[in-house]
Amino acid sequence: MTKFIDLTLSGVSSGAIYAAVALALVLIWRATRIVNFAQGAMLMITTYIASAVIGATGSYWVGFVTALLSGLVFGAVVERVLIRPVEHAPPLNPVILTLGLYTLLVAVAGMIWGSTPRSFPAAFSLQGYAVGGTRLLFTPNDTFIVLVVIAVAAGLALLFRTTPLGLQMRAAAFAPEVARLLGVRVARMFTVGWAFAAVAGALAGVLVAPSVFLGPNSFDPILVSGFVAAVLGGLDSPPGAVIGGLVLGLALSYVSGYEGAALAPLAALVILVAVLMLRPGGLFAASRERRV
Amino acid sequence: MPSRAQPWRVDLVMLSIEGLTTDYGPVRAVDEVSLEAAAGTVTAVLGANGAGKTSLLRTITGLVPARFGRVRFDGEDITRMAVEEIVRRGVAHVPEGRGVISELTAEENLRLGGLWRGRGAAPVSEIYDLFPRLAERRRQPASRLSGGERQMLSVGRALMGRPRALLLDEPSLGLAPVLVAQIMTMVRSLADNLGLAVLLVEQNARSALSIANRGIVLNLGRVVADREPDELAADERLRHAYLGF
């Protein structure tokens, strides 16, 4: 029973991180119909920046905020400089471009910071909570991870649902031409969408870095998990991304806890294939059919 | 019958188009079209399918680039401006098929139309006074609205930004005759009461001419007639060849 609770709690914690990555992918997909394969490398860079700032200032929180802010700027710059010129090109062009960006960023990170993974501090203690006589695997830092991802997801939801900016962003995503006819500066909305997405990615980066270490390729697996979570959630829906992340986190936690950690990547792949074959619109696809 | 007696400030030309030409690849969709639309007037743009009516509107608002010619709005050359900048100057375009965003609620669609105006936007309640049906449907996703309600929504949404010119692309399409009459009455009153310069693209020539100050007939992208509505309706050759009644 303790094992089940442990696995559930750690599944929620890793699921929260997958949810943040999935959010980053979903925000970009639904705004610009591009799967951003460079997301993992972008959050790697912002995490390196955080690491440098933490090293220089000695403050985790200054580094944490710097990571999110640099994500905001980075996302906007990537959209404005690289993606906008190919927005009207055939769908394959931006995909190849994001793959190219991934390669470039990994190489640049290796040149600047070397390829040896380094440690990254956690915000709070990594020692599990003591319950009765035993210690849970769930730590104060896991609590922080879950809460901050919930806060960011809820903040995004509020922004989309209740603010004029969110309304314009949704309109630009759903119907760009009509949005332009209503005076919405659609291109600017896409830039903002990329910026917010990169913030969610940067958040995932600093949250996961203490457990995967910080190296140029450290975050590749997290991108795969985030992508599976996004597909689970329907690729189009931010709430779906969060739920997809949690479902995937739990599933992988149970698989690796009961069947062995080596099976987890395979399980993720099985889930991805199963969803694509059985419910291509995601777990929560309503009657609405949408070509993707 | 709606009044056509005194279109106000009829001397004030809002929209002036000179020699406008648009190509879709090798096809010339709009061919040296010139026209003027004054405040408080309805200009009907008529013609068969493929005559270039929709392309004309899309060129005016910049959705497709003009090859030659010039579009002026309130004296300013808007020919090469981006769509959203043209809209932000006060040219509202209700596209073919109405363009309501089905993922948003009726009220979100409305509010969206006024955002660019900031504080100068019409209050939502003003649109609900104009179209009480929409008030009942405000929280529904636009996908649940009927054809007539969508038409009201898209027109109401365009009015949110308090435009000075209104381009309507086949507002009667797919509506029952009684609704068509209502829409036409409403279009007339928008010109009369708000002083809008309305460019009304229609296949339903008879209804459109009944409320218009001027009728323009397009064929293969060219203006083949630009006359008073009564004269157009009386010209049997034009009616048979291009207007279908």
Image: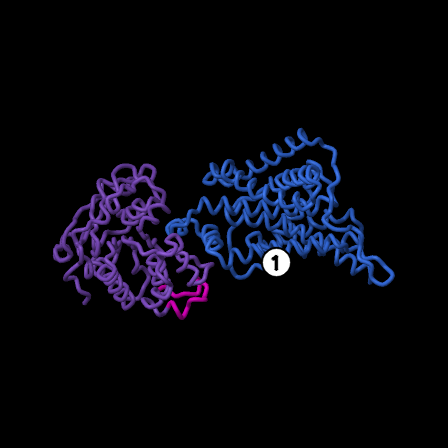
Chain colours: A blue, B purple
Provide residue B77's location: percent of width, then percent of height: 27, 41
Image-based side of A18 in relation to A36, left or right: right
* Amino acid type assigned to the residue bearing label 1 in the image: Leu
Provide residue A135's location: percent of width, then percent of height: 83, 57
Element at badge 1?
loop
Which is nearer the eye, B206 or A177? A177
Provide residue B192's location: percent of width, then percent of height: 21, 61
**The magenta stretch spans residue A190:** no
When asked about the image quadrant of residue A45, the answer is top right
Q: Residue at x 20, y 55 (%)?
A: B243
When asked about the image quadrant of residue B122, the answer is bottom left
Provide residue A41's location: percent of width, then percent of height: 63, 39
Image-based side of B14 in relation to B58, left or right: left
Q: Chain of mark 1?
A: A
Q: Considering the image in quadrants, where does the N terminus of chain A appear?
A: bottom right
Which is nearer the eye, A72 or B6? A72
Q: Residues within 10 Å of mark 1 (few under 14, many from 20)?
A: some
Q: Residue at x 20, y 52 (%)?
A: B38
Q: Is residue A52 above or below residue A179?
A: above
Residue position marked by numbered label 1 in the rendering: A283
What range is drawn magenta here? B134-148
